[in-house]
Image (cartoon, rainbow, N blue to C red):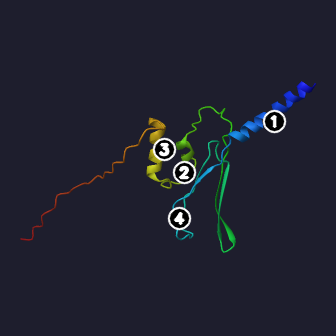
Amino acid sequence: MRTFLIFIFFLLVVPFAILWTMSSTPAVILPASVTALGQATPLTVHVADPHGVKQVSVTVEQNGMEYAAGEVKQSSRRFHWQRNVADNESSRRSQFFNLAKEDKVPDLDLNEVIWKSVKGENSVMPAPKRSAFVILEKKKKDDDD
């Protein structure tokens, strides 16, 4: 009976202990210091965790008052039994892309994520080549004679 209780104890406690020890603190990446913050000031905050981020809430405190700046909710990826789900830096970066409206995602970031998804996570994306189409017309001669 005692052996059975020890077995049940390990069966219930050990998985939680393993998950707790393998978990890590999410990495929060903030931009360089912002000198002024207003309603139209863009501020990018990157939060990354190997197991995924379930919820991120950003608040700004000013003069003792807290203002909600944004919130993102997603399902976490603690268990890796999902099939065909990429778990790399590019997939974590693309989670925060705003694809609801065109041109909201920085084009170089989106191009790099697409490049790495096709060529491999360790590949280096070449610099973009910008070009334009120019149509030249012959100048018409004015006959003022």
- x then y, percent, for residue 21: 71, 40
Q: Are marks 3 and 1 in contact (CB under 8 Å)?
A: no
Q: Which residue is mark 1?
A: 13
Question: Disc 2 versus disc 3: distance between alpha carbons?
Answer: 11 Å
Q: Earlier in the sequence, mark 4 or mark 1?
A: 1
In primary-sequence order, the first of circles 4 and 2 is: 4
Estimate the spatial distance between the alpha carbons at disc 1 and disc 2, rounded to whole Å: 38 Å
Identify the residue at horizontal 12%, vertical 67% (top origin). 142
Q: Mark 4 is on which residue type?
A: Ser
Mark 4 surroundings: few (<14), some (14-19) or many (≥20) residues within 10 A: few
Q: Which residue is mark 4?
A: 33
Q: Which residue is mark 3?
A: 113
Q: Looking at the picture, which amino acid does disc 3 mark?
A: Val
Nearer the camera: disc 4 or disc 3: 4
What residue occupies the far bottom of the structure in this picture? 63
The image shows residue 63, relative to residue 48, as above or below, that is below
In the image shown, does 74 or 48 lie closer to the viewer? 48
Q: Earlier in the sequence, mark 2 or mark 3?
A: 2
The amino acid beneath tag 2 is: Phe
What residue did someone put label 2 on? 97
Q: Which is nearer the N-term, disc 3 or disc 1?
A: 1
State the CA–CA distance, disc 4 to disc 2: 23 Å
